[in-house]
């Protein structure tokens, strides 16, 4: 596995503006996913890019798609220390099968000792736990990249229903671009992609888990619930902080 490090940037200008995100959305309007994604990669249209993956319920589709185009693209995985054992085994299986350039990211040990020495912060402050174990490590790792790929899909929840393919990350002061290749894929298309390419499913799916994060804050969903209703159940929380629920779409 490779190791990432934060590097200082000499420029202070935003990497991307809202207008540039709008232009990219218009440029590839109506294009098939693999077609426009290949054009972005091979044309070097967005600079240095990384894929951020949780190796969750549907992650194999995007990981497989990207690996077919360019397997050298770094795949950033946040090892929070709270994942299901099944997720870690699935991560290793997909890494080997697709030949992924996986980079494991870890929370800062001094931060954990100072703010979560019992490991139970998730039980009374899930936002703080996510900040320590996900948001901060990813922020450091992404400092060397201009854009990141996500696995978000519109059908997953109402907060993701209107997201575009390309957007400027509102949580990033440097104006990093966030790209959502599967945003317009529905559950049927994802299932068909898994079938077509004989992709393995996350082992927790058969136990009713539709969206899979850290084990203390993830439950199986009930019939009729949206796929992400099993995340942070009982809390007024729909995202870990990596993605902001109020991000505005650029068409």
Image (spheres, rainbow, N blue to C red):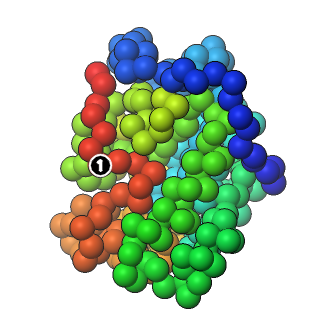
Q: Tell me if residue 190 can be seen.
A: no
Residue position for label 1 = 245
- Residue nearest the viewer, comparing 110 with 42: 110
Q: Tell me if residue 231 can be seen.
A: yes
- Residue nearest the viewer, comparing 219 with 240: 240
- Residue nearest the viewer, comparing 5 with 113: 113
Q: In x, y percent, where is residue 188? A: 34, 48
Question: Is the residue 143 above or below the residue 168 in the image?
Answer: below
Q: In x, y percent, where is residue 130? A: 47, 65
Q: In x, y percent, where is residue 138? A: 58, 51
| Lateral position of residue 170 relative to residue 132, left or right | left
Q: Residues within 10 Å of mark 1 (few under 14, many from 20)?
A: some
Question: Is the residue 89 above or below the residue 99 in the image?
Answer: below
Residue at x 67% of width, y 58% of height: 105
Give the structural element (helix, strand or loop) at label 1: loop
- Residue nearest the viewer, comparing 221 with 16: 16
Residue at x 41% of width, y 60% of height: 240
Question: Is the residue 71 above or below the residue 79 in the image?
Answer: above
Image quarter where the N terminus lies is bottom right
Q: Quadrant of residue 122?
A: bottom left
Q: In x, y percent, where is residue 212? A: 45, 67
């Amino acid at each position: 596995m490779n190791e990432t490090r934060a590097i200082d940037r000499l420029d202070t200008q935003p990497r991307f503006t809202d207008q540039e995100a709008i232009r990219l959305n218009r440029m590839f309007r109506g294009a098939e996913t693999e077609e426009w994604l290949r054009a972005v990669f091979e044309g070097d249209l967005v600079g240095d890019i990384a894929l951020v993956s949780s190796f969750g319920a549907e992650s194999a589709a995007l990981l497989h798609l990207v690996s077919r185009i360019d397997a050298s693209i770094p795949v950033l995985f946040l090892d929070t220390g709270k994942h299901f054992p099944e997720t870690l085994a699935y991560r290793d299986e997909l890494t080997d099968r697709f030949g992924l350039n996986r980079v494991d990211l870890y929370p800062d040990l001094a931060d954990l000792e100072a703010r979560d020495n019992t490991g139970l912060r998730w039980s009374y402050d899930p936002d703080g736990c996510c900040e320590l174990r996900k948001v901060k490590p990813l922020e450091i790792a992404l400092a060397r990249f201009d854009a990141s790929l996500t696995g978000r899909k519109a059908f997953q929840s109402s907060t993701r229903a209107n997201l575009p393919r390309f957007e400027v990350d509102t949580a990033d002061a440097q104006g990093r671009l966030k790209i959502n290749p599967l945003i317009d894929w529905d559950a049927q298309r994802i299932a068909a992609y898994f079938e077509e390419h004989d992709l393995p499913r996350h082992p927790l799916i058969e136990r009713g888990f539709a969206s899979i994060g850290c084990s203390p804050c993830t439950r199986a969903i009930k019939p009729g619930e949206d796929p992400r209703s099993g995340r942070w159940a009982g809390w007024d929380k729909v995202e870990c902080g990596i993605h902001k629920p109020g991000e505005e779409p650029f068409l």
